[in-house]
Image: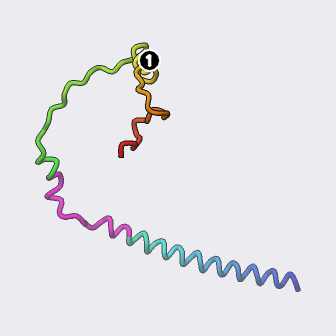
Amino acid sequence: MTEYLNQTQETQYQENFSKSFVTSVVLFKKKFKFCLNLYQKEIHGSLTRAGKVRNQTPKVEKLPKKKKLTGRAKMRFLYNKRFVHVVEEQGRRRAGPNSNKNK
């Protein structure tokens, strides 16, 4: 009797699993087709205006930059920045470069 119940439970489980699998595959296909349709359409105007803003902006030549420090000179610069030229605030640690303490 228990074997019969186990077999019927297994077949019910397999049927339910196969039905849910088929519906999930169908839903996936529908979603996939919907996504493909979205990507195929032109949403933001025609392609004839592509690059309009970039082409309208005036070209500005880059300014020459100073060479970066390397090796011993860089370590010296960092040491001086962190420990020598530190302005003490009232009982606080020095604020980092990304802090919003002024706001």
Residue placed at 46% from the left, 72% from the top? 29
Please, which residue is most extreme toward the right here? 1
As rendered, which of 37 and 61 lies closer to the eye? 61
Pick out the residue farthest to the bottom.
Answer: 1
Identity of the residue drawn at 46% across and 21% down: 83
Magenta stretch contains residue 98: no
Task: Please report the residue visible at 27 percent of the width from the left and 67 percent of the height from the top.
Answer: 41
Query: Which region of the structure is painted magenta?
Result: 35-52
Is residue 72 toward the left or the right of residue 52 in the image? right
In the image, residue 46 lies in the stretch drawn in magenta? yes
Side of 10 relative to 27 (left or right): right
Outermost residue, front direction? 90
Image coords of residue 55 (percent x, y): 13, 47
Say few, some or many: other residues with alpha carbon within 10 Å of mark 1 (under 14 / 14 to 19 / 20 or more): few
Task: Give the camera-side residue of 101 and 11.
Answer: 101
Q: Residue at x 17, y 51 (%)?
A: 51
**As drawn, 103 above or below 28:** above
Q: Quadrant of residue 44?
A: bottom left
SS at mark 1 in the image? helix
Kind of residue sitting beneath label 1: Met
- The N terminus, quarter of image: bottom right
Position of 62 compared to 34: left or right? left
Q: To which quarter of the image does residue 101 belong?
A: top left
Q: Is residue 71 above or below residue 14?
A: above
Measured as percent of width and height from the top left, residue 7 is found at 79, 81
Q: Which residue bears the numbered disc 1?
A: 75
Quarter of the image holding residue 72? top left
